[in-house]
Amino acid sequence: MGDVWVYWRCQDMDDVSRVCDLSVGGLFLFTPVPPPVGARAKLDFLVQEGQIRAEGVVRHHVPGGGLGLKFTAITDKDCPQLVALLDRIRTVSSTPKVPSFAAPSH
């Protein structure tokens, strides 16, 4: 998916985590000790697109693996940066990988 990181705060916990999956509706991020389902979180994305702040609620978690958050709020000002981030991720993940051992065609 690329290298996307987020600073997040939830129930007296502050952490920086790698985002494993991202969509317009929410994200899944890696954390060894996820908060409980229903907990509310504030997010600040650490990305080249600029400031993206959002709020979310924990929808599911995988002990020792991470948590899924559903977005509940994002400012109108930050929406264009989120769209740009999603476009970049789609472009990176859809770019075909050419094996380095492939012989050039003649």
Image: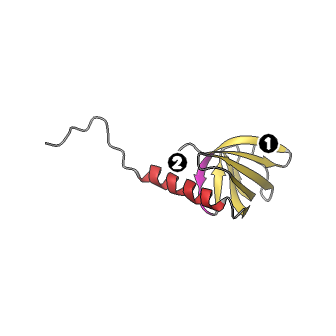
Question: What is the distance, in whole Å, between disc 2 and disc 1 at their CAs?
Answer: 23 Å
Residue 56 appears left or right of 94: right
Residue at image coords 74%, 58%: 56
The magenta stretch spans which residues? Answer: 19-24
Helix, strand, or loop for circle 1? strand
List x then y, in percent, for residue 27: 64, 55
Q: Which amino acid does label 1 sit on?
A: Asp
Q: Nearer the viewer, residue 30 or 42?
A: 42
Q: Does the magenta stretch include residue 99?
A: no
Residue 18 spot, x, y in % from top left: 63, 43
The residue shown at (55%, 56%) is 84
In the rendered view, tell whether residue 95 sits above or below residue 26.
above
Scheme of image coloration: secondary structure
Q: Is residue 79 above or below residue 20?
A: below
Q: Which residue is drawn at 81% across and 56% down?
A: 39
Q: Name the residue under label 1.
A: 14
Q: Which of marks 2 and 1 is nearer the N terminus?
A: 2
Q: Residues within 10 Å of mark 2 (few under 14, many from 20)?
A: some
Vertical arrangement, residue 57 with respect to residue 17, above or below: below
Q: In this view, does 68 lie to the left or right of 84?
A: right
Q: How crowded is mark 1: few (under 14 residues within 10 Å), some or many (20 or more)?
A: few
Q: What element carries label 2?
A: loop
Residue found at the far right of this picture: 12
Residue identifier under label 2: 1
Using residue 11 as the reference point, say whether residue 21 is left or right of it.
Answer: left
